[in-house]
Amino acid sequence: MENEDAGTTAKPPETTSLFPVLLQPSSTGNNTDNVPEWLRNSSFTTNLTVINDAVSSHYQQSQLEESSSSEEEERAEKNKAKVSGPQYELLDSSASDRGSYSDDDDGETKEKRRNRKKKKKRRKRELSSNAASLHDYALASSSSRKPDVRAWSSSSSSATTNKEYYFDSRGDRDNLAFGSLYRMDVARYKLYNSTKISDLSIYRWSQKSSVFDEDDDIEGLDGTLRSGGRYWSAKYAALERHRNLKRIRVLPPEKNVSSIYEDFIPLLYDGDSDGRSPSGAKVVEESWEDEVYRKTKEFNKLTREKPHDEKVWLAFADFQDKVASMQPQKGARLQTLERKISILEKATELNADNEDLLLSLMKAYQSRDSIDVLIGRWEKILVQNSGSYRLWREFLHVIQGEFSRFKISEMRKMYANAVQALSGACSKQYRQVHQIATESPVDPELVSLELGLVDLFLSLCRFEWQAGYRELATALFQAEIEYTLFCPSLLLSEQSKRRLFEHFWNSNGARVGEDGAVGWSTWLGKEEEQKQKFVTEELSNSSDEGGWTGWTEAPSKTKEVIETLENDRVGDVVIEESDDVSETRDDEQDDIETLLKKLGIDASADANSEIKDTKTWTKWSEEELARDRDQWMPVRATSAGVPDGDDAEGDEQLLRVILCEDVTEYLFSLTSQEARLSLVSQFIEFYGGRISQWASTNNSSWDERTRSLEAFSHSILDMLRKVHDVLTESKSIQMGMPLECLVSSLDDISMRISMVKFVRNAALLCLAAFPQNYILEEAVLVAEELSNTRMNSSVSRVTPCRALAKCLLKNNRQDVILCGVYARREAAFENIDQARKIFDMALSSLEGLPLDNQSNASLLYLWYAEMELANESDDKSDSSSRAVHILSCLGSSVKYSPYRSQPSNLQQLRARQGFKERVRMLGPVWARGRIDDNSSALIRSAALFEELTTGPVAAIEILDQAFMMVLPERRRNNHQLELLYNYYVGILCNHNEEIRLSKTWEAIVKGLQMYPFSPYLYSVLVEISHLHTSPNKLRRILDDYCSKKPSLVACFFSLLFEMSKGGSQHRIHSVFERALENEKFRNSVVLWRCYIAYESSITCDLPAARRVFFRAIHACPWSKTLWLDGFLRLNSVLTVKELSDLQEVMRDKELNLRTDIYEILLQDEMET
């Protein structure tokens, strides 16, 4: 009883902390005198019922009170409940006593005890569960819901011997069953900042009971509550997305900092004490509706203040898309779309010439209007902006991808209108420029217009090729190159020029790419010479005869009548013969029908009804592909290839004849050198030629060309193969590159050889229009190698292009850049000694050449040094010494002499100083945007010299200095600087042991921000990530780039990584589907073909491949190869009726089908 008295008379002071810092004096009885001083802390002497009541009251609280008065009442009730009882001595409790309270606690009244029991019963009734109560979790009772979990610290029988914490080493299997974590196993936190937002709540709930306390232990709930009571359930997600849910938002200060600090920059950061937000930043609590109201008000103000700022209008329109995404009702979303359209219409009224606003408006119209109404709106806009390449390109994409309206003839009309409109805009701009300036300056706007016109022409040729009209595509290329590059130098009007070209096209003269072609102007000159020679011979013959030659009768009416009668007689004979021929044809037709009936084929019936097996359609598709491979060159009407008879073969050959009327409406003239070079370079790439990078990957033509491919280009395919070799290096069995196997080129070796010869002839002829252009010269020599080696690796050490290179050098002995190109080809075939002789000869003869030829010296020196380093053998020091010697001659500006010994330190010092001076002199030139191949080669030579003599760090400093001389915007659009940046990244990757990985990673990330379509940077990213990071991190990086800056190149590398590393099918499907969700990639033929081939060949899911195939032909109805992929890959899941219907749709869309199904049926009958 002594303890009781003590408990009633002396009460320990109340504290808000469970473990106070200061020890408080004890006023208990004599039984505590023997207790040590450290046990007299109130944390050990406090009654355990205080903890129990505090925990129970915390979890019983149903809602957070907003007003301060309610919070004070709640704290008053808690203070009344925290009545201290008597102090207890520390006794060892058994396991059976865990979680219960002492029966000897006489300090508490019976009324409080009954109240506590009532509260416990009430909670059990509300929960409807036999699970342990929440205060049992606080006390860690022995009745755990998981028997495998060991006891916690409070349940220990000995507080001095056991540990104070435990690890749960066994996972909860219920997480797999329910698909989520158990709510009580996940800690919930509430943001609390006592200095700034102590009076604000993160979430405002309704005045009903708290939603978090409605579900306790899911195992004790019934089925209805179990579906919506788990962690992250639909109920919580709906609350999180509710538009009335208020959140804390930190808004930037509204004051204009630039107006405050006009004359100086402050050194001190003006922020709050804890550094969380700058001064002036407002912390507001707003819901989604409040945010919509606030931003709408801000945008209205900005559009009034800046009505001609298109970025403000576009941001306002994009915000409407965000508003629509938060609206579940379709009607509300349509209203938001109407509001977006009204915003953009107002913007286009104020900025009628802005292409971004017009494109955004047309995309909004596309979401609302039907296709007929949309095309009408497009036509109105194109009439007002006929000279915009971007608008024409987007319009052609819209109508080309519309399956219901797609027709080849309609598309040709649209392309003809686009070409004529852009050609007229170029002519108008050319006249304006020449009226102002007497000279011929380079007008950037004119160059941009002509480059867009070339890109549109390439889209037309690619469209005709993919639709099956390959002869027409080839004829278009031939006609445009002849019309633009080899036009006679005569002052002719456009109409006279077209008549003269028609005469050339209808003649027997060889065209570009054909054997014996000399160009339109040269052919015209030779024809005039022949005419003059013929006239001279006739005059000489007439003068040799001499004397009286007799009277010459003038033409009379009698003669005309006689000729008319003779013509009528001949006509009657022709009519009689035609009648006989028609009768003969009828007899032949009857004989053919009789023959078909004997073979069991009814010619009067539908051909498709005679087909009983899908193998027939497989043979038909194979024959169709074979004829496409062979028939890609146009046929002359008077050539021997067209038979004189009227049989089917003759009709088929006549269809391959391309008349001048078929190409004349697509012809145009180009005046800028950049547009002409773009036309020739894209022509070489179109027919499979190998050409170095001639434009930046940020160029619109690069992305357009990548998205319109049917198979991978050589530049992308080489990068993919390189990355695949790195990814599969550790595997014992080397496998082929997956993407190459999926979309392999179906062209046989004969077609590739004929195409390479065609490219060789055309590029060789175009060298006359682009003298000393090393890109075209290299393309010519590589094409010569491919045509001579039959696309296989050559076993002979003789370079296949040696004869052609010597012939070209013989014609122009001062072309030292051609010497360098020829020497590099010799080195590619491991003829190092021969290559050294050529380089030494070219560099030694530089001083005697004109200044124009000496300007390419930096390229020769760089190529020579890189050749030495690329062909390092066992004597590595010799190759490095040779390279240093070559670069020392360039840096010190001394006459080149062949290598004899390693350069001295003094020579290297002079070369280093010379490089620094020359790089410094390039600064003003590059700042004005005059960046060429020679200056870029000089920077690379200086960096390579420092890398060999000093180290990679010095080389990187030179490159950084060069990049600082150019503005970032010019850096993005210049292909020389892009190649220089690739060289910069290559140095970092080659010296990864000396340079930190973080610097290399930073350079790659920065490069992808500037060049998001670069295959080289993506290949380096995958290689570095494969070696130094986890696969999941690389996946996140690639997904991030695909979402922020969509690129087909990123999708290709992501697919390659997953397929090479054996990624999951779900991951590969997600990459395909996310790429095809993008509007830009929805019409990519190569992406659809990869998807179909993956489903049919790798996963072997033919029903899924069938679904993808129908989606593909709906998105790309013009691609004949895509249609035939379905015939070849899906013949086991497509019925005969479906294949027949597919062919009928192909004919309805006017695709060029070269094979009649009767031919296949006849072949089958003959075989049987």
Image: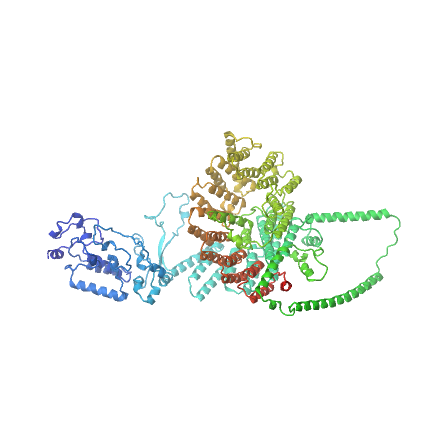
Seen from this angle, which residue lies furthest front?
1168
The quadrant of the picture occupied by the N terminus is: bottom left
Judge left or right: residue 839 versus residue 997: right
Q: Determine the image quadrant of residue 14.
A: bottom left
Which of the two residues, 382 or 742, is positioned nearer the viewer here? 742
Residue 805 locus on image (x, y percent) = 63, 41
Q: Determine the image quadrant of residue 1132.
A: bottom right
Q: Answer above or below: position of 314 versus 861.
A: below
Judge left or right: residue 602 versus residue 973: right
The answer to whether any part of residue 1014 appears in the image is: no
Which of the two residues, 723 or 616, is positioned nearer the viewer here? 616
Judge left or right: residue 298 versus residue 716: left
Residue 24 locus on image (x, y percent) = 17, 50
Residue 3 locus on image (x, y percent) = 12, 56
Which of the two residues, 337 or 980, is positioned nearer the viewer here? 980
The quadrant of the picture occupied by the C terminus is: bottom right
Which of the two residues, 234 or 163, is positioned nearer the viewer here? 163
The answer to whether any part of residue 660 appears in the image is: yes
Residue 1139 locus on image (x, y percent) = 57, 64
Q: Answer above or below: position of 1096 versus 809.
A: below
Q: How many marks?
A: 0
Q: Answer above or below: position of 865 versus 110.
A: above
Judge left or right: residue 887 versus residue 72: right
How has the structure been colored for display? rainbow
